[in-house]
Amino acid sequence: TVLCNDGVSECPNGMTCCETADGKWGCCPMPKQAVCCDDKEHCCAEGTTCDTKNMKCISTSTKEQLPMWAKFPARRRADWERQKGQ
């Protein structure tokens, strides 16, 4: 685990501790060198900076804009796939 700066909170290995808006700690699901954003709600990958106004992470080398969080819908199995296991 990764011990956060308060000495009592921890995050799973490979994640980064970031302070939350209420003064507690949260875990950023990115490698240990992630960037904690000033809004204390988001984080960005190593080698990027936070653009909280536009909700983007900006690469410091390529200036590429990346989303802070990306979601995608779950795939629903087709009827024939569900029946296949019966």
Image (tube, rainbow, N blue to C red):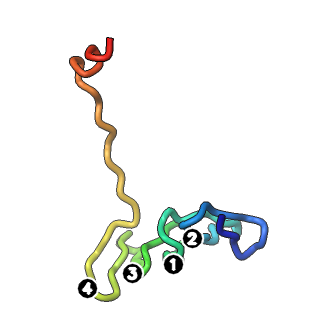
Query: Which residue was labeled with disc 1?
Result: 33
Few, some or many residues within 10 Å of mark 3 (<14, 14–19, 20+) = many
- Dot 3 or dot 4: first in sequence order is 3
Helix, strand or loop status at disc 3: strand
Q: Going by the picture, which residue comes out furthest to the top?
A: 86
Query: Residue 81 occupies which quadrant of the picture?
Result: top left
Query: Which residue was labeled with disc 2?
Result: 16
Few, some or many residues within 10 Å of mark 2 (<14, 14–19, 20+) = many
Residue 24 in picture, x, y percent from top left: 70, 66
Residue occupying image coordinates x 24% and y 18%: 79
Query: Which residue was labeled with disc 3?
Result: 48
Counting labels gives 4
- Residue 60 against residue 64 in the figure, above or below: below
Residue 53 in picture, x, y percent from top left: 40, 74
Q: Going by the picture, which residue comes out furthest to the front?
A: 85
Helix, strand or loop status at disc 2: strand
> In the image, what residue type sits under mark 1?
Gln
Query: Which residue was labeled with disc 4?
Result: 62
> In the image, what residue type sits under mark 2?
Thr
Check residue 67 in the rendering and tell me which mark sits there, or answer none: none
Q: Quadrant of the N terminus?
A: bottom right
- Frontmost of labels 1 and 4 is 1
- Disc 3 versus disc 1: distance between alpha carbons? 10 Å
- Disc 3 versus disc 4: distance between alpha carbons? 9 Å
